[in-house]
Image (cartoon, rainbow, N blue to C red):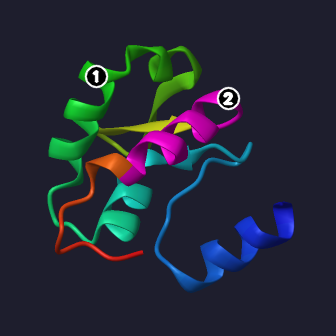
């Protein structure tokens, strides 16, 4: 799994923390082909608040706290995200 993550990080602009947590909005932007990942994220956490148990905010830049996730939360995000894509999205 780590090799796959490193390959993804090298290919796509997905931010991650030094300890391996991944920026949720970057993944949503990539997988859902959207320029409005925060809209999908808000609906996703409203519908599935259990995701937040493994999420936290991380300051990638000063004043820019973005949601990051790993572990069980990461698997939940990926599992649910499929259902939040529009008919124009692609994976």
Q: Which mark identifies residue 72?
A: 2
Residue tagged 1: 47
**Residue at horizontal 64 percent and vertical 81 percent from the top:** 10
Q: Nearer the viewer, residue 32 or 19?
A: 32
**Residue at horizontal 23 percent and vertical 53 percent from the top:** 37
Please tell me in which quadrant of the rendered image residue 9 appears: bottom right
The first of marks 1 and 2 along the sequence is 1
Q: Is residue 26 left or right of residue 84?
A: right
Q: Which residues are magenta?
A: 70-82
Q: Nearer the viewer, residue 36 or 84?
A: 84
Circle 2 sits in a helix, a strand or a loop, which is it?
helix
- Mark in front: 1 vs 2: 1
Locate the N terminus by quadrant: bottom right
Find residue 25 and report its horizontal and vertical position in percent: 35, 51
Residue 35 vs 7, above or below: the answer is above
**Residue at horizontal 32 percent and vertical 25 percent from the top:** 45
Is mark 1 in CB contact (under 8 Å) with mark 2?
Answer: no
Please tell me in which quadrant of the rendered image residue 72 appears: top right
Residue 70 vs 78, above or below: the answer is above
Find residue 20 and report its horizontal and vertical position in percent: 71, 47
Find residue 21 and report its horizontal and vertical position in percent: 63, 43
Q: Which mark identifies residue 39?
A: none
Query: Is the stretch drawn in magenta largely helix, strand or loop?
Result: helix
Separation of disc 1 and disc 2 at Cα?
17 Å
């Amino acid at each position: 799994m780590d090799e796959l993550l490193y390959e993804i990080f090298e290919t796509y602009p997905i931010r991650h923390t030094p300890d391996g947590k991944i920026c949720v909005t970057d993944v949503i932007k990539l997988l859902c082909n959207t320029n409005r990942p925060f809209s999908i994220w808000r609906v996703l956490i409203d519908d599935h608040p259990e995701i937040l148990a493994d999420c936290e905010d991380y300051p990638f830049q000063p004043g820019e706290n973005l949601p990051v996730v790993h572990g069980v939360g990461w698997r939940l995000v990926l599992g649910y995200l499929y259902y939040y894509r529009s008919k124009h999205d692609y994976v």
